[in-house]
Amino acid sequence: MPGGGVAIAVRGWLVMGRYRAAYYDPDGERHAVPTFPWWSAPAGLATRRQLRLQGLRPGRQPIAAQILWRGVGGVRVAYLYQVSLARPRKPATAAQLAALERAMAARRTCSTCGFERSYCIPLSLGECLDCAEGEFLMGKKLGVALAVLAVVWFVVKSPAGSAGMVRELWSGLGDFMNALAGGEG
Ligand SMILES: [Zn+2]
């Protein structure tokens, strides 16, 4: 990039804040690779992703430069390649497509019930929605069963005659149901 050097340098000075200057190293004197901060990379260079958008891939060329910026979790890097040395992207082979399809099928398959779903299994659940819902309902049933057991245990173990206790509980339950129904109780 002989012609654009001065313009790049000027632009670099204008664009960069003080800490960004640490990432401006166009000759790679400090970083081994020509290094630029965000937005000041010279024309003719592109990231792998930008190449892909143009239907290109880097091919066998080495990394031409890098962009450094302060991002989440510290200094981040993006590698740049010469667009002029890029190769057209090869269409995916049948084997690659098959591998992709297998990978997607694995992501759609529930590890609990083993069914392949029409959607990807949510990582937060780790299983399909049917399984997750089933466990939720099971949990509710278990909770009710435990509550009933607790009441029975309480009645059976209570020292003050169980018959009277059952009657008391029963009328209490009736009052409760009436209150729920908005009755006079
Ligand atoms: Zn499932």
Image (tube, helix red, strand yellow):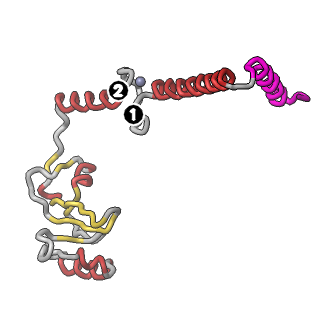
Residue at the image point whose x is 62% and y is 26% from the top: 150
Mark 1 to mark 2: distance in Å? 8 Å
Mark 2 secondary-structure assignment: loop
Residue at the image point whose x is 58% and y is 28% from the top: 143
User: Going from the N terminus, do you reach mark 1 or mark 2 first?
Assistant: 2
The vertical placement of 136 against 87, above or below, is: above
Residue 127: percent from left, percent from top: 40, 30
Q: Residues within 10 Å of mark 2 (few under 14, many from 20)?
A: some
The quadrant the C terminus occupies is: top right
Q: Which residues are magenta?
A: 161-185
Is residue 2 visible in the rendered image? The answer is no
Closer to the camera, 85 or 165? Answer: 165
Q: Amino acid at mark 1?
A: Gly
Which mark, residue 54?
Answer: none
Residue 116 lies left or right of residue 32; in this view the side is right
Closer to the camera, 136 or 184? Answer: 184
User: Quick check: which quadrant has ligand 1?
Assistant: top left
Q: Amino acid at mark 2?
A: Ser
Residue 70 quadrant: bottom left
Mark 1 secondary-structure assignment: loop
Taking the magenta stretch, the answer to whether it contains residue 169 is yes
Whether ligand 1 has any atom under 8 Å from the Cβ at mark 2 is answered as yes
Taking the magenta stretch, the answer to whether it contains residue 6 is no
The vertical placement of 116 against 51, above or below, is: above
Which mark, residue 126?
Answer: 1
- Of all residues, the one furthest to the right in this rendering is 184
Q: Are marks 1 and 2 in contact (CB under 8 Å)?
A: yes
Residue designated by label 2: 111
